[in-house]
Structure formats: C-alpha cells, structure tokens
Amino acid sequence: MAVIKKATIRDVAAKAGVALGTVSRVLNDHPSVTLQARRRVQDAIKTLGYQRDAVAGSLRNARTRMVACAIRDFDIPAFASYVKAAEAVFRRAGYTLLLASTSNEKDVELGLLRGFAQRRVEGVMMTMSDEADAELASAIVGAPMPIVLIDRELLQNVDRVMADHQSGAEEATGHLLSLGHTRIGMIVGDPAAYPSRSRIAGFRRAHEQRGVEVDDALIRDHALSNEITFRETCALLSGPNRPTALFVAAVDMLAGTLRAIRSSGLEPGRDITIVAGSDSDLAELGTPPVSALSWDRAEMGRHAAEMLLERIRDPQPRAPRCVRLPVSLIVRGSTAESRSR
C-alpha cells in the first residue's frame, strides 16, 4: 500500500516561493506579511493540503527566555562594555544571553540566524557585514524573531542603535586641520558597514568645510586587524611626502599604528600627530596619551537590550526606532601643531 507523504512547512515555502519565516508568520496571522505573499502561502497550503501540527506548534511557541548577540569578533575589547551592559538588562528580565561571533562574514550571519530560529531564540542583537546585501537584509527582515541592529544604518525597517560616527570623525579631522595639518592619513575599516562609511564622510566633510583638498591616496580602508593596520601605517609613513597627522578610525586598531610609527623611528605627538577613532585603555595610558573619539558603549548596550525586550513583550507592529548616541573628541598629548605652521 502506497504511503502518502504529509506536506511540511518546507513544502509550503517551496511551493509559494517564500522563506520559512514568511510561512510561519502567515500561519500565526502576523500582520507584517504583504498581501501578495500571504495569498501565495495560502494558495500553497490549499494545493498541498498542508495541516498544521498542533502539538508541534505548541512546543515551538513555548518560551525559551533566550536572546542572542552576534558580533563581528570577540577580540574587539570595545564590544565588552556593550555586551556586559546588555546582559545585565536581560538577566534582570529573566533572559539568558547567547553570544556568537560572525567573523564579519555573510554566510556565518545567515547560518546563525537560521540556528537562532531553530533554537527558538526570542530576539537577536547583531552587526551586519554588508548593509547593501539584499539576501542578508531579507533574512534579517524576515526573521521569525525581533532583531536590533548594532551600529548599522541602511536597513531602516528594523530597530537600530548606533553612534554618530560622522560627527565624531568630522570633529577629530577638524581638530587636526585647525592645528595646521593639511596632509592627514586615514586608516579605516570596511566602508560596507556604517561606522567606517560615516567616518569617511565626516573626514571628507571637515576638509571641505575648510577648503582643504583630500588626498585619496592617504585613505586606507578595510583595516580589520592590527596587522593590516600596521602594514597600511608603514606604507603611509614610507613615502617622500608622508602625512603629518594620522586619524586611525578603524576601531581598536591603534596598537598596529603605534607599532608602525615606532618601527619607523618616529614618536607620536612629536614627529607625527595621531587621533584614534575609538577610546581605549591603550589610548589613555600610552606615551604620550592618545587623543581619541569616545561614546558610551554601555549605554548603547542598554538601549539595544531594552528595545529588544519591548519587541519581545509586545510583538504588535510598530514603526522601527533608531537611537543615535553622540560621539566626542578627547584631546590628549598625541596631537600637536604642524611643524610647517
């Protein structure tokens, strides 16, 4: 006797040409699904004769009281205060925080989103390797749980918490220009992500406001490790017309730049002026102490955690929210007037 295979939710998704999360939201009558997608799912359910498993559904809907945070790299100390503050908010609310590293890779991010959904994680805070990637954006928007993006800007239909990196970079660059530096080197991360992209914009805007032309050869991007930062700093300092000031806008890459400066026989604050894009113990305790941009990472973590808990507790659709924290410059001994002045 032939065995009739029972249609699954995957069969429905394949038939309708939508993601599993979309089928799940239709089954749960979630209002975020478009009318066109809802009709396709409903037609596929009718055609396949799909019947929902009430027992499995009740298990899937059980509360796990788990949330997740997926960040680029555990090695970045700047994330520590963010995660610590967020975890404290979740712990007080009775939630357990799972921590994962994305290595800034799209496939890892997509895999983590699938894994979080399978484990019934109730909400996710995460970075995003490429804000312009359509597949990744679709996975985030279509996720079955609420998501808060960390320091990302372009995906405006989800909640976001970010720092105002453009104004910070503009202030730092303006400070260097006010000291007479007109050849300023910039070492920055991946422009596909909001922090680096906005820092470059602030760097250019400060030059434009003061009528100083930017030398694009002095901008070195994709500095995602101290080793890369070391090499890029050495390259900037080895030319015959080297910059008189450096803006190390790549987060937590100051060590690579300081190592390159000293290996070139130069002294920060005396032979070359330097500003770090992110304050740290190294910046504060260096010799001399390094001027740096600063923002409240703990406050960023608290905001993200509270926003996520609000979405979990009240899943009714509301307009996406964005919290933007101010960034300010701390001036220390590593900045000095240009010798040409």
Image (cartoon, grey):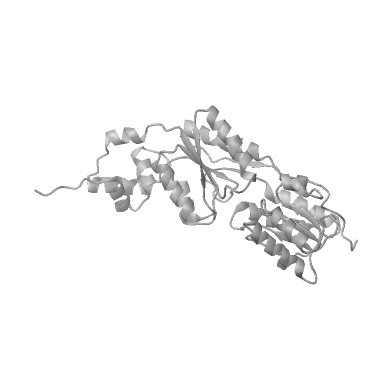
On screen, residue 119 above or below 192: above
On screen, residue 41 above or below 264: above
Position of 29 with respect to 331 (left or right) is left
Name the residue at 67% across, 57% down: 188
The residue furthest right is 341
Q: Residue 208 appears at what percent x and percent y?
A: 77, 60
- Report the front residue among 226 and 141: 226
On screen, residue 190 above or below 60: below
Position of 190 with respect to 40 (left or right) is right
Which quarter of the rendered picture does the C terminus lie within?
Answer: bottom right
Q: Residue 206 appears at what percent x and percent y?
A: 76, 56
Position of 119 with respect to 299 (left or right) is left
- Report the front residue among 80 and 190: 80
Dividing the picture into quarters, in which one does residue 305 lie? top right
Q: Residue 275 appears at what percent x and percent y?
A: 76, 53
- Report the front residue among 292 and 139: 292
Number of numbered labels in the structure image: 0
- Report the front residue among 14 and 249: 249
Name the residue at 53% across, 39% down: 319
Asked if residue 204 can be seen in this view, the reply is no
The residue furthest left is 1
Q: Residue 315 appears at what percent x and percent y?
A: 46, 34
Position of 175 with respect to 90 (left or right) is right
